[in-house]
Amino acid sequence: MLTNEQTRVFIVDDDHVTRHLVRKILSNSGYRIFEAANGAEAIELFDDVAPHIVLMDVMMPDIDGYTACRAIREKENFLELPIIMLTGLDDVESVRESLDAGATDFISKPINWALFEQRVQYALNSRSMHEELQNQKSRLAQAQKIAKLGSWELSIDDNELSCSDELIRLLRLDPGEKLPHLDALVAFAHPSDKKSVRAHIVDAMIKGTGYQLEHRIICRDKLELYVLQHADIIKDRSGNVIKVIGTLQDVTELKSTQAIIHHQNYYDLLTDLPNRRLFTDKVIKKIVHAKNDDAVVIYMLTLDNLRTLSESLGYKATETVLISFSSRLKTLKSDSVVISRFNDNTFAIMSSDLHDLTHVTKMTDEIMALTNQSISIDTHDIFVTVSIGISIYPIDNNTAEATILGAENAMLNASKQGGGRYLFYNEKSNREAQERLDIENDMRKGIKRGEFIPYYQPKINAQTGVITGFEALARWNHPTKGLIAPYHFIDIAEKTGLIIELSKSIIEQACQQTKQWSEQGIGDFVLGVNLSMKQFIDNNISADLKTILQATGLPTNQLDIEITESMAATRATDIISILKDLKEMGLTISMDDFGTGYSSLSQLQTFPIDTIKIDRSFIIEIEGASRGVMVKTIIAMSKSLGMNVIAEGVENTTQLAMLLAHGCDNIQGYYFSPPLAADKFSDFVATFYSSKKLNQNSN
């Protein structure tokens, strides 16, 4: 196996920052680093570098990563070279195109540097293991060709059988022991192979032709071996068969090596389930041989929030969950069911036992039931949910590939709808998948063109009737589609990592506008901005906010950071340390959507929280007895902890009156105003104090 100092790593990326970071990390471990700034340069330098692994960006000028990857795969001596694609594209089609181009693996951008070197080392180890297995196979084949491990000779006239010493040893007989006749040799054949062995020998004697046969033998010590038997005939001058001579090679080790290679190629290393390649082959074969009335059902399932688990407890915990869940899935296996680990956190199931829709939903219920019990990881009991997509051949699609893709699209839709559910495939799924890709591409362009702008929803002090601030909410001012609400694009921004750049732009614009309103004497408002989990994990949010505040001149006490309760629950330790940094800068902190996560008010004492924002779902149902009591309790307990309270989603006078009666500090919602563009917000401020809405409800 190569040492790090002997290993040549070829980095191909048009982004010099990425190349620098990769070089820095891998150089520290001793790897020899070579670089190319684009696909064309990579192809030109490739033969001189002769790398042991290639790390290649997908999107590059001139020649992209896909094309360069294909060009490398055409080189005769580099068919097994690990090629890892570095890509900011994480949709199913981009991953599939990378693999089709010959990539070994892919790493999504932004790169998780903590795991990056391990991924590279894993690819190198896999290559070394594969090369070693291939070398063993080659050496073994050469040795078997030179040394015939055992030989025998049968005389037709007297049926006398003579065996070499090597054959006697192979059969685990005593040295010098003899076999009296042919049947005594055939008797060592495995019971399932005995008939075939005898038939080949008889045919050789009758037809005068040799043969080659692989079969099993049971040695005297009960050891089972695979042997390759060659036989030929000897004729006299008249053409009559007078002897049959044969050799037996022990190919057990070769069979074992072939089995190992086959297992590596077709089975997942972590779960020992069939991988994507084997699963797809099985689906194709099943559909090709399906009769007119045969149906094949494909279930694609993904574990929800697995990334959040990895971020909170580490990748080892994720592996534990995947192994545990795959073990549960294996309990569903039968002659008509094939189970696969399709990719990272996606499993696939093929079932050919379909009589009606009831059988399909029964299997789905069985899969869902596998998540009822927790998975223990150290001191944690982890509960997972699963999103399932279902596609049926030939009802939904008429090819294996289309049926699998249909199930994938349905699975993604189930996950998008909150997870913990299943959806059937239909044409709408395909359209939505394409629309999602179009939105992502448009978003990338829109961020560069400044199409994303903040809208401002006011927060009103319920006791004084004064506008104290507002929440900045992203809107997309699309050049052809007009104003687009956030629920159309925020989820995509989160999953693609675009949320970091998008959020930074919104915060910067909002800070500039807030500062401008202060200077114009309109009001010294407190600006509330939402941060996503990605900004805490993948970005230096404290430094970014400090830079924005310095650039815009907005005082720190006029910026309030809003985090969701679910964020705090999943990454409490990391969140708290960053929030403390922000508090030291002079910012205030609000917990948004309170009541929808897993926190209790007592747990909030560990967070540097200034304000609790009660989720709108509680306000909508505040007139109900249980919800009304819960809202009143949240307000009372928050105040006892020294926190302010904001009620979100207030829409009518009844809700407002009840909140005022419960002593709520601040109100936000459509009762006063929807989110407004900057110019409309200025108009709102000018006219608000003439409104009697608040005064009427406080009397």
Image (tube, rainbow, N blue to C red):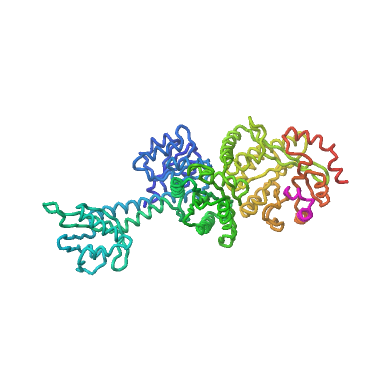
Is 76 covered by the magenta stretch? no
Q: Main secondary structure of the magenta part?
A: helix
Horizontal placement of 11 versus 407: left or right? left
Quarter assignment of residue 557? top right
Residue 611 on image: x %, y %: 73, 50
Give the residue at x 25% y 58%.
248
Give the residue at x 69% y 36%.
512
Horizontal placement of 77 versus 335: left or right? left
Quarter assignment of residue 694? top right
Give the residue at x 49% y 47%.
293
Quarter assignment of residue 473? top right
Is 626 covered by the magenta stretch? yes
Residue 269 on image: x %, y %: 45, 54
The residue range painted magenta reads 615-634
- In front of the other: 154 or 357: 357
Give the residue at x 79% y 40%.
672
Residue 172 on image: x %, y %: 26, 67
| Number of marks present in the image shown | 0
Residue lying furthest left: 237
- In front of the other: 646 or 336: 336
Residue 535 on image: x %, y %: 61, 45
